[in-house]
Amino acid sequence: MAQSQFRSTRKVSGKKYVNVRKKRQCDLGGVPAHTQIGSNKEKIKRVMGGNQKKSLLRTEFVLVNDGAKVEKLAIKSVENNPANIHYTRRNVITKGAVVSTEKGDVAITSRPGQSGSLFGKFVK
């Protein structure tokens, strides 16, 4: 289900805003990707201006930056996801999630549902 990204109808004081224009389809947010672990699958979406966005639906690798070099590591499972407590047991990957790999835990720094790629850094 898409969520509206349109401004609230009420101010902090409780007074109503005066609408300058009606809601538009471009004000709707997208459907959440819920990126999971599995064979690579992505979806291409058309966005405003005729541009395209990739949404990562499934992936099995993460690119980890370790200062001087970048490594491609296989994901074992999701250790922690602060976005939603239920995402951890469902193995849903979002920005800020911590995943376990063979070389240690990795925190995700990219937005896989928006950028279509998965980057991370080692957790100290």
Image (spheres, helix red, strand yellow):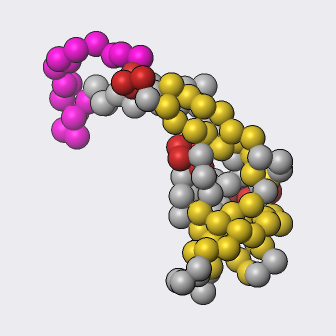
Q: Which residue sits at x=75%, y=51%? A: 59
Residue 86 within the magenta-colored segment of the rendering: no
Q: Which residue sits furthest bottom?
A: 124
Residue 1 left/right relative to 90: left
**Quadrant of image for the N terminus:** top right
Expressed as whole percent of the image width and height from the top left, the position of residue 4 reads 44, 27
Residue 82 left/right relative to 102: left
Residue 53 left/right relative to 10: right
Residue 107 appears in the picture as rendered: no
Expressed as whole percent of the image width and height from the top left, the position of residue 61 reads 74, 61
Residue 45 picture quarter: top right
Residue 76 left/right relative to 26: right
Magenta residues (range)? 10-25
Q: Which residue sits at x=31%, y=30%? A: 8
Q: Which residue sits at x=19%, y=38%? A: 13
**Residue 121 versus residue 116 in the image, above or below:** below
